[in-house]
Amino acid sequence: MAKISKKKLKPRATQASDHRATIDEAFANLAGLDAKSLARLRTPVEAVIRALDSGLIRVCERTNDGAWQTNEWVKKAILLYFRLQKMRSIKAGSLEFFDKIAPKKWSGREGVRVVPHAIARYGSFVASGAILMPSYVNIGAYVGPGTLVDTWATVGSCAQVGANCHISGGVGLGGVLEPVQASPVIIEDHVFLGSRAIVVEGVIVKTGAVIGAGVALTASTKIIDVSGPAPVESRGMVPENSVVIPGSIAKKFAAGEFGVSCALIIGKRKESTDKKTSLNQVLRDYNVSV
Ligand SMILES: CC(C)(COP(=O)(O)OP(=O)(O)OC[C@H]1O[C@@H](n2cnc3c(N)ncnc32)[C@H](O)[C@@H]1OP(=O)(O)O)[C@@H](O)C(=O)NCCC(=O)NCCS
């Protein structure tokens, strides 16, 4: 039997995380990095971005207790990658761009439908069964299996989107690349985000939630559950299966009282909600192109 070297048995993910200490150390000493030490970082940093690009590692991962844990060292590697990369001309057919990060390459083996001119940047990962309508997925972002990213939706750097989500047209998911310790925007599995909804600043949308068209969720947005006898206010997280619509709340300012926007949880997902949000499944069942 052919002898397999230990090196070959080692999973690539482990190889990427082997560079963690080097990256942490370099990042802690950013100001003192001269050209030579920066050049020495190219191999480890590129290994991390390659592992990100192929989905072997993620910026943020779910722990066994369901919480999300940010891998700061991976974010640091992305920031170092920006430093290492030179601006250059990037050609796509007769189109030409000028940037540091190449677009992601597709062979067809990924099982992802990439409708022209969807762009995912190198260092993002899109799982099999996902559909990218003409949209944008930035470096460090993760798009789970079976998820539809509809036209003009943007998945910001490091944003994490779970499985079988419907990200409607024009949705804006902010990424949180900096500060490195901050949690990115997280959209868990089976979430529906209505047209032009915005989720930024590390807000977490839990499994099965339905975010109505035009809802904007920042870390400061009041999320008020109005489905019970009294309003219940929170921020930063939408609970599982909640149906959220845009609302407004009166706020006193020096100049008087004004309405500021908020998000209202009007109840839990029901059959009628599912009907309104089932476009994703129709697309899959009938291979409909939108
Ligand atoms: C959130 C949403 C799915 C509705 O969820 P639902 O559980 O079916 O809610 P209902 O229609 O039963 O509405 C419950 C109440 O909230 C109100 N409401 C629901 N969605 C609302 C919205 N987006 N804005 C304001 N009010 C809304 C309804 O008027 C209704 O009030 P009523 O009982 O006085 O009539 C829907 O409003 C929505 O935003 N869909 C997104 C569509 C979209 O973007 N598609 C993109 C792909 S094409």
Image: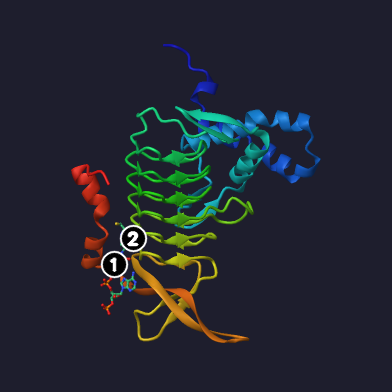
Q: Residue 31: give x, y in percent of width and height.
A: 79, 44
8 shown above or below 245: above
Badge 2 crowding class, 10 Å Cα cut-off, few under 14, some 14 to 19, many 20 or more, is: many
Under mark 2, the amino acid is Gly
Q: Quadrant of the N terminus?
A: top left
Residue type marked 1:
Arg
Residue at the far bottom in the pictured view = 256
Res. 273 in view:
yes
The residue under label 1 is 269
Q: Looking at the picture, does residue 35 appear above or below residue 184? A: above
28 lies left or right of 284: right
Name the residue located 40 percent from the left edge and 50 percent from the top edge. 162
Circles 1 and 2: CB distance less than 8 Å?
A: yes
SS type, badge 1: loop
**Is residue 20 visible to us here?**
no
User: Looking at the image, is mark 1 or mark 2 earlier in the sequence?
Assistant: 2
The residue most toward the left is 286
Q: What residue is shown with label 2? A: 208
**From this viewpoint, which residue is outermost toward the top?**
1
Q: Is mark 1 within 8 Å of ligand 1?
A: yes
